Each structure stands twice: as structure tokens, then as C-alpha cells.
Image (spheres, rainbow, N blue to C red):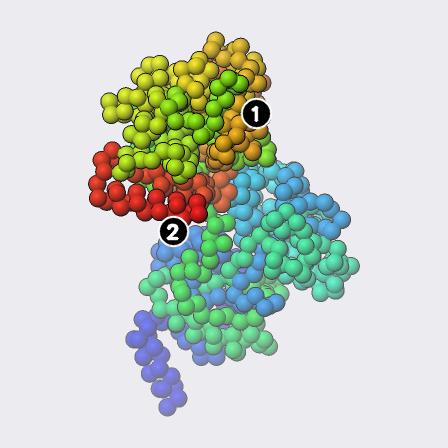
Amino acid sequence: MIWWTSLVFIFCFQTIHGMNEVRWCTISDQENKKCNDMKSSFAQAQIIPLLSCVSGQSSSDCIQKLANNQADAVTLDGSLIYDAGKQYNLKPIVGEVYDQGVGTSYYAVAVVQKSSNITINSMKGAKSCHTGIERTAGWKVPLGYLIDTGRMSVMGCNVQRAVSNFFSKSCVPGVVNASFPSLCELCIGDGNGQNVCQLDSREQYYDYSGAFRCLAESKGDVAFVKHSTVFDNSDGKNPAGWAKDIVSADYQLLCRDGTRAEVSEWRRCNLAKVPARAVVTRPDVDSSVIYNILHEGQQRFKDGSTFKMFDSSTYGGSNLLFKDSTLELRPIFSQTYQAWLGDEFLQAMWGINCNPDKLPKMLRWCTISTSEIWKCADMGSAFLNMTLSPYIQCVSAESPEDCMKMIQKKEIDAVTLDGGDIYKAGKTYNLVPAAGESYLDSSIADSYYAVAVVHKNPSDAFTINELKGRKSCHTGYQRTAGWNVPVGTLVKNGFIRPEGCNIAQAVADFFSSSCVPGINQKSFPKLCQLCKNKCESSESEPYFGYSGAFRCLAERAGEVAFVKHSTVFENTDGKSTQDWAKNLESSKFQLLCPNGARAEVTQFADCNWAQVPAHAVMVHADTNIHAVFGLLDHAQEYYGSDSHLEFKMFDSSKYNSKDLIFKDSTNKIVPVKDKKTAEKWLGTNYINSLEGLQCSSSTVLTPVNAAVLLFFSMLLIKISV
């Protein structure tokens, strides 16, 4: 009767769950041997459904077999769970649990010898030890972190090239690209000159212990491992000859904030919290079936005499099927790869996840003037000469907003914008920053000051309190330093009092005449009265932009110019060869302070109207921002210096203009780091100053606009009080 009962149970199980076996995918001969032993042990213990073993060439091959219904389960680490979930919708169902109280996770750390002086900020040029190519703690997390924070730049998705350029020498087991021999230069193989840089235990510097051994034997300067690796191989825990004299206190961790910590402080000093390895399967598979057989198996064979689920020593390998450090397997209830991996880890994966097939062959750059398209064409040619990718293709547009519209439609790819346009690009067109400008003054490298410049004139030393009725010069309509900041400040302080929502008309009423390039000339003729040409938001108007607004002042068309703090210095004291500027002296100009005082132009840090964010390269939200920054970062290695003869990224004098593509005061292009949205790039304070001016786009007072204006007016009064 026993055999009949068992047969009935097996029949019922198959009927309910639709599975008569679970096909487990293995990635090596050693793992396949362990899998077959597990299959036999489970069958002898009458654990059902039965197991079968499917040989795969790699973890990626196993993922493909699961997707194609040629296998049902495989254990993957975090980075591969990310790939499997994103590409094939595979789901994590059972997680490994490790020691040291971290449950179903561990921490990726960077370990150095205590005697070294390396920090996370000084790793460039160091020698590195990795667990293996594409491994989580040893490759994807540290490199994803370095890329995402801008410490390492990648061009064209070529991460291996980036690593070989960043580190002087490395051991990255599994690298097969002979183009970057430095990535295997520290590897030693089996000790007899064989199997060097192999992605298995034949390479003695493979896996966690191997990467740490690479550091311990002073081959490398930093090892990327997991938080328990040092303890597993020190203080007598590892009897191997290379490890028997290692003391854990001789090593430290590199922290994200640039400090160092003892190896016991891995909870606060790590590169990322990494989700544990997990068993994954297809969405159509009942996860409870797989968990049940594994749960019953671990109860019987966790420390079995004939078979041990979490021990690979019998097979001459390590971490076969499951990690050897696994204490138990637990079910996963939120079975999506995003929930299992967590935001921190996903961010690291986003940093390194780059598909070259999805990168554009050309980066279509938007320009808004004839001079700018000339410079853009030269930039494209110069980049091509250095085989930088993607190549630059120049596209002409009428205005920054036209550029935004085309990027939104994916007709072009990139444009450099100032703060006011960045706000509009993010809010209206959902564009994101890919790279930013950094300026020469290191104290405010990622921002600049908006200032009001006037002539130094003892007989007419007017202040902000006597600004009404003066003639004003602006960089452009809705531009940051030239419109949004000064107008917002004057409105906030009660100098300009808009009727209804018509701020532009209020500005026209406040100043006697102005040049505001880009304003609607027919609606506001006074705001274009000082302009020399067509009052357009382009180089066709000589008074457009920072230098143009300052020229408006210098030629005494206007009495005050709203520009950035460096504009005066860029156009005086022989810095400019333009006829209108070549004889100007910076000492002949002063700043108007919001508190009613005047100051010298050198005192911009204490006399300014706002500190505003730097310009940024804006792209479509689907664009790989790391690839854009990687291109520009590599380009500035060749063309970032003003002494380069062929092309100068941050100099527009050759084109008889200023601030083309990038501001001429740019020192270098920098990564956006964690400011990956327009809102984060601009900052809360700056956005708040813009929000009160949003009704300026309307010239008609409606009940809705009136209510909006009343709200912001009350808000400003409340803030002032």
C-alpha cells in the first residue's frame, strides 16, 4: 500500500502543479556533478518533484535557457538577477541567507592594506584585484559606483577600456579581450604559468578569497570583495599557506565619503548593500514548488553525511549551485527583481549597464546660431580625429526651446542650457542633465553668481533703490542671470509690482528702455528699444548673451547689465580682442548689491543677486548619460586646454563670439553624480525663485492667473516676514 500511496501522491502533485521535474541549470562540470548528486540525494529522500540537471555554458546561457523553457531554475548573483529580470522578466523566488547578521544580503567593500594611503578619491592609477569579470562585488558594484559618481568615465560602453585606463594594473579573472592586457597583468594562474586569468579556481586570484589574496600578497593595492572576505581569510580562519599569518587588523575599508574605516565597520563603510544570490525562474512557474523541494532538501542535507547542499569542497570548487557560506534558503515574497535588488544596488547597476547596440552612432548636437554651428562642426571634426565616439553631428535650431522640442521627439540628442532653460527642459519636456560645466573659481565650481553691473560713476552712483527709470541690458528673455533672477528679485522686494500676471509689462513700465533678446517685440517694444539688431535670442543680436548684455552697458546703450560674475573679467583688461571690449578696464565697473550698496566687481561673492546652478548638457530621459559624459570627458583630455591649436572646447574667440556650445569660463565638464534630474541639478531654492515667475508667459490677466499671482504674492510676503 505504501507504493500505491506514493504513486497517488506523485500523480496528484503533477496534476496540481503541472511539473513532474525541476530542471536545474548548471554552469560548469563541477557544478553539474554536484547537481546530479543533489538530484540522487533528493530522489532517495523521496523529495518531489524530481530534479534534473541541464548543462549551460555560463550564467547568461542559463538565463537564456530559462527564458526558452529549456530549464526551470538557476542561482544567480545580484547583477545577473538584474539582467534576467530586466531582459526576460525572470523572477527571484528563493534567497540565500548568510552569516554575520545581514540575512539575505551582503556588502560590497573595497579593501586596502592599512599601511597604504589610498582613498576612494585617489584610486586612479592604483593596482586592483577583482573577484572576476561581471561578478557583483568584484566588478559590477565597484565599477558601477565609480562610473555613476563620475570618478571613472566610459566611452562607448567600453568598460574594460575604462578600467584599464583608470587602474595601472589589475587581475580581472575571465577577461578575454587581448586589447587590454593590463586587466590580467596581476593574475598568476595555477602557479605554474598555466590558466592565467581564468574565470575559475585554476586562477589563484579568482573569487573573493583569490581577490583578497591578490591584495594580501601585495600584488594589488585594492581588492573588491564582500564584507566577510577578510574575516574568512585571516586570524587563523583559513589554513591555506598564503593566509595562515594574515591579521585582519592590518587591513581597512575605503568609504564612499573619502575616509577609511576598520574592516569590522562594513555596515557604515561600504560601496553598496548587495542582495544575496537568489534562485530565479520564469513567471509561469509556481515558485512554491521549487521552494518546497529546496526547503525539504536543506532540512535533510544542510549538514548531511552523504551530500551537503552548502559545501562544494568535495567537487574541487567553491560556491557551486549555492554559496558555501549559505546558512539557509528563504522564500522571497516580493518576486520582482527591483524589489529584491533595492534602490541602492539598482543605481550601481544603472551606472554600469550599457548596451553598445543601443547607443547612437552619432550624437546630434543642437546649435542656435551661425557661429555656434561653425564651432560645432569643428568640434565634430576634432572628435573624429581622435576616434571619440559617438561622433558629433550638428543640427541648427531657432531657439533653445526648439532644441528641447526636438530632443523630446528624439530628432536630436543634446544641447547645453542655462538654469532657466534647464528648468523648462525638465518641467515641460522631461529632459535630464547628462553633464555639467565647472568653472574656474574652485569655490563655486558647480555654480555661478548672477550680478548687476554698472559703470563706476561718482556723479551718478545710483543703487538698486534708484533703479526705476534706468535703461537695462539683459542676456535674454527668461534667461537665468539676465531675466529670471533680477526680475524675480525686483518683484520679491517690491520694486516691480505686476498688475495681474503680466510681469513682462511690469518690467517695461519699471525701466525706461531695455534690450531683452527673445522677448515679443511687438507686444513689448520698450523691452527691445536698446537692442542693436532684431532683439532675437541668438548671435544675430549683438547684445544677446552675457557678453552681449555687458556690451550693451559698455557702449552706454544701457545703464545696468544683468550678467554672471565672470562676465566683466572675460571682456576687460585685454581678455577680449573684440573692438568694443579691447580697451575696457574692469576697475571702471561696479556691482549693485541687493542691500542697497555698491561693490567692486571682485566682490561678487558678497554682492550678488543669487548663486545659480551651472549650465548643463540636457538630453532625452532615455539617453545613456554616462555615455554622453564619457565622450565629453575623453574629449576634454585633448581639447579642454585653451592652448590646444586644433580645437578649443572652452574658447569661442576664433568664431568672433562668446560662450558657444560651452561657456568660455568653463574649466572642465563634470558628471552630474546624484543630480540626475533637472530639479536636483537646479536645487530647491533656485526652483522656488522660478516658480513665482511662471505666470510671466501670459500677458492676459484671467481669474485663474489672478489667483495664482495672489497665492505667490502672499507666499513672498510670508517669506519676507
x, y percent for residue 668? 54, 30
In this picture, is 713 found above or below 472?
A: below
Packing grade of label 2 (10 A; few <14, some 14-19, many >=20) is few
Residue at 60 percent of width and 54 percent of height: 270
x, y percent for residue 711? 32, 47
Q: Nearer the viewer, residue 150 or 446?
A: 446
Residue 716 makes an appearance in the image: yes
Q: Secondary structure at mark 2?
A: helix
In this picture, is 570 found above or below 28?
A: above
**Farthest top residue in view:** 579
**Farthest bottom residue in view:** 1
* Labels 1 and 2: the sequence-earlier one: 2
Which image quarter: residue 267? bottom right
**Farthest right residue in view:** 245
Q: CA distance from mark 1 to mark 2?
A: 59 Å
x, y percent for residue 502? 28, 34
**Quadrant of the frame with the N terminus:** bottom left
Left or right, 703 with reference to 587: left
Q: Secondary structure at mark 1?
A: strand
x, y percent for residue 49? 40, 74
Residue ID for mark 1: 600
Residue ID for mark 2: 87
Residue at 62 percent of width and 65 percent of height: 313
Left or right, 323 with reference to 331: right
Q: Nearer the viewer, residue 314 or 248?
A: 248
The amino acid marked with disc number 1 is Glu
